[in-house]
Amino acid sequence: MSTPDFLKARISDDVTLAYVDSWHGRAKEDMPERYTTVVGLHGVGFNSAVWTPLLPALPSSIRFLAYNQRSYAQSSPAFDAKQPGGTDATATYLCDLMEFLRFAVEELGVQGVDEETHEGGIVLLGWSKGTVLCFSLLSLIHLTSSPSPSSFLAHLSSSGLPHASLLRTHIRSLFLFEPPGSALGRPPTDDYTSAMKAVSPPNSSTPTEFAEAFAGWIGMYAPSAHADEVAEELLPASGLDALSPELRQLAWEPACVAHGFAWRLAEGADEVQRLAESALKPTGGVALPVGLIYGTRTNGYCLDAAKTVEGWWGISDDAQETGQEQAKRKTAVRKVPGTNHFAFIHEPEAFAKAVVELVDELSL
C-alpha cells in the first residue's frame, strides 16, 4: 500500500503544517456533488501517514484530510511552552486546528454543511492525544464563566477563537477515538503504570527510552474477559508491529513522544477532569454532536477513559434508550470488537463502518 505524499499548508506567516489529502489531484468535476470531509487529528508519536490503511476502506462520499502537528514531519517546530502543564501550547495548537480548517475551506474548497439537507461539512476525528484538541474546542464552546488562569483557556487571544464562524457553517460533529485517561484527568491504570513508571518523573530516562516504553505500552490488548473472546496471542500484531516497514519508517516519530506528553487542558488533573466533563457533559447538552469509538480489547487506560465518557452520557451495556433520547443527547458510541488503539490499522473496514454510522446517526 503506497503512502500519501505530504502537502504543505501555510497557516500563518511563520507556521507551516504538512498534511495529507485522500483526494489530492482529483479534478473538481470528478468529486461528488455533496460529500463529508473527515479531518484526522493524530496522537503522540505518529504523524498523519499513520491513517494510510484506513483510506481505502472509506466510502467514495468521504474525503479525508489530516495534518501533522507542529514538531512532526515537515511541519514547523513545536511551540515553546512557558506555562505549567504546557497550557499555552494547548491553546496554540487549538488555534492551529482552526487555521488549518480555514485553509481547507478557502484553499482546498472543503464544503460546508448544507442547511437544507444537512449533508457535507467537516467531522473532526481525534485519535488518542489528538482528542485533546476536540476537548479543548468543546470546553471553550461550553464556557460559562471566567477561565481559570491554570487552564489553556487563559492563553487564548482576547479576540476569541480564530475563524469561529466555521463552527456554524462547516463543523458538523466531533469523533473521539480512544481518548487516553490523561485527557480526562483520570489516574493511571495498572497497565500504564507498569509500562511507564520507570521512565517517568521522578525517575529519569532518555527521550529514546521514554518513546520505546510508550510504543511498547500503547498497543497492548486487554486480557480476554470472556471464554468466547479470542486469546491475546491470536490477535493481530499491534503497536509498531501493526505498521508495515514502509509505514513505520514514515509515520513513527519517536523524537516527538516526549513533547506529546507536555501539553494538556490544565495544569492539574482535577481541573483537566472538570474541563473534559464540561466538554462532553455540559448543562443543556453538547453544542455539537459527539461520537465515541473504541476497541473492546484496548489497553486499560483507554478502556477506563471510554467507560468514563459512557458514564457521563448515561450509557451502559444494560441501558435501553429510544432513538428520540439518543437524538436529544447528540452523542453516540461505536465499539470495534476484538481490537484496540490501532483499530483503523487492524480492522480498517470495521473502523470505517463505525465512522460512517456515526456520521449518519449524528446528522444535524
Image: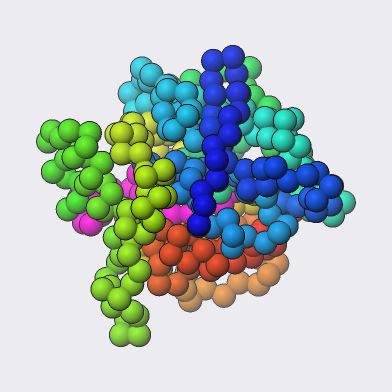
Q: Nearer the viewer, residue 250 or 309?
A: 250
One can see residue 131 in this view: no
- Image colouring: rainbow
* Image position of 283 (left or right of 107): left
In this image, 327 relative to 9: left or right?
right
Residue 82, position in %: x, y? Answer: 36, 17
Q: Quadrant of residue 139?
A: top right
Tally of numbered discs: 0
Q: Position of residue 137 (x, y in %)?
A: 56, 36
> Residue 50's spot in the image, x, y percent?
46, 49
Q: Quadrant of residue 47?
A: top left
Q: Which residues are magenta?
A: 174-193
Q: Height in image: 33 above or below 337? A: above
Residue 142 is situated, as x and y percent measured from the top left of the image, at 59, 38
Residue 9 falls in image quadrant: top right
Residue at 50%, 57% in the rendered image: 1
Q: Look at the picture and state if 74 lies above or below 135.
A: above
**Residue 28 seen by the camera:** yes
Q: Is residue 65 left or right of residue 177?
A: right
Please tell me which residue is depicted at 73% across the width and 57% down the height of the picture. Answer: 61
Residue 79 vs 288, above or below: the answer is above
Picture residue at 24% right of the left edge, 53% below the top: 216
Q: Residue at the bottom extreme?
A: 228
The residue at 32%/58% (across/down) is 241
